[in-house]
Each structure stands twice: as structure tokens, then as C-alpha cells.
Image (cartoon, rainbow, N blue to C red):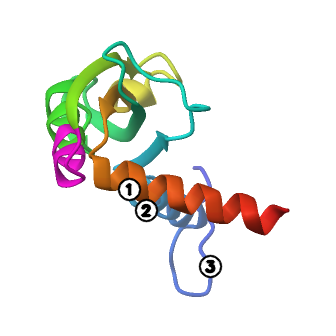
Amino acid sequence: MGKLPRRDSRGTNPPMKHLTILALLLVSSTACTFHSTAKRWNDRVGANGNPVYVKSTTNFGLNLGIILPLFGSTEIDSMVHDMTGEIADENGDRVRIIESAAENYWYGWPPFTWIITPVLTTVTADYEPSAEQRAADLKAAQEAAAEDN
């Protein structure tokens, strides 16, 4: 007969404790969203002759069984909706989606990633900021440049 699994002082199996901690870390790190906006263009303008900002949003989530969303907003439709909502909150206008990408990493560590699949989705758009937003950003840039000198 084989040996019984070793147990720690609380009576739990150490490998199971490690798997539980790993699972909690995975769940807590899901649904991360990263935003960035490029606002400094050396006074260059977009195709319409107006200044443009470029906003990029990246979401990390987990799917169950490769295709069923489990944690995080990893669908392009919902990401475009959220991003254009943020642009609308800033009174930006004339949005143009530059890039959208969804990477499903089912092949990462099979068969584990066939069950819980990491997904990385990115949407990038350019838009014309409102006059108030542009003026506030120019003022902040001038103040930052004055502090550097």
C-alpha cells in the first residue's frame, strides 16, 4: 500500500493548499483593465485638421472552456461600448477605431488552459477631444514644461 499524503499541523494537504492559493491569485488578477491616452502630438493634427487623442484599452480576463467568458469583459463589443462611453464623458467626438484584437491563449499550458483560458483584448481608437479638455491638457503640459526648466 502507498503512503498517505503528508499533512501539515492543521491537517491539510500542502499541495492542495498551494493549489488553493494559486487559484485565489488567478481569480484576483482577472478582469484587469489598463487604459492609456496619448495627448501630446507636437501640435500635429488629425485627418480633419483638428487635434486628436489616441486612447487604448486592454482587458485581461478568463474564459471557461476556451469560449465562455468567466471573468473580465473580453468581448470587443463591450470594450468599444465602454471606451466610447469614457470618450463621451470627456465630451470627445468623432471616434475612429484604429485597432481591435482579441487573443485567446488556449494553447498556453494544455490541458489547464483548455479549461481556464486567459484572454487579452485590446481596442485602440482616436478621437477629437473637446475644446475644454484640449485647453486643460495644454495648460497642464505648459506647467509641467515650466517646472522642468
Q: What element does badge 1 sit on?
A: helix
Q: Amino acid at mark 2?
A: Leu
Q: Which mark is residue 8?
A: 3
Q: Which residue is mark 2?
A: 24
At x 16%, y 46%, the residue is: 88
Question: In this view, which residue lies farthest toward the top?
Answer: 47
Q: Magenta stretch: dominant SS?
A: helix
Q: Which residue is mark 1?
A: 27
Q: Nearer the viewer, residue 131 or 120?
A: 131
**Lower position in the chain sequence, tag 3 or tag 2:** 3
Q: Nearer the viewer, residue 118 or 129?
A: 129
Quadrant (top left, top right, bottom left, bottom right) of the C terminus? bottom right
Question: In this view, which residue lies farthest toward the bottom?
Answer: 9
Residue 10's spot in the image, x, y percent?
A: 53, 86
How many numbered marks have been drawn onto this rendered protein structure?
Answer: 3
Is 43 inside the magenta-drawn segment? no
At x 41%, y 35%, the residue is: 53
Residue stretch rendered in magenta on the structure: 84-92
Residue 65, image quadrant: top left
Vertical placement of 16 versus 48: above or below? below
**Lower position in the chain sequence, tag 1 or tag 3:** 3
Residue 145's spot in the image, x, y percent?
A: 72, 58
Q: Amino acid at mark 3?
A: Asp
Q: Does residue 42 appear in this view?
A: yes
Q: Amino acid at mark 1?
A: Val
Q: What element does badge 3 sit on?
A: loop
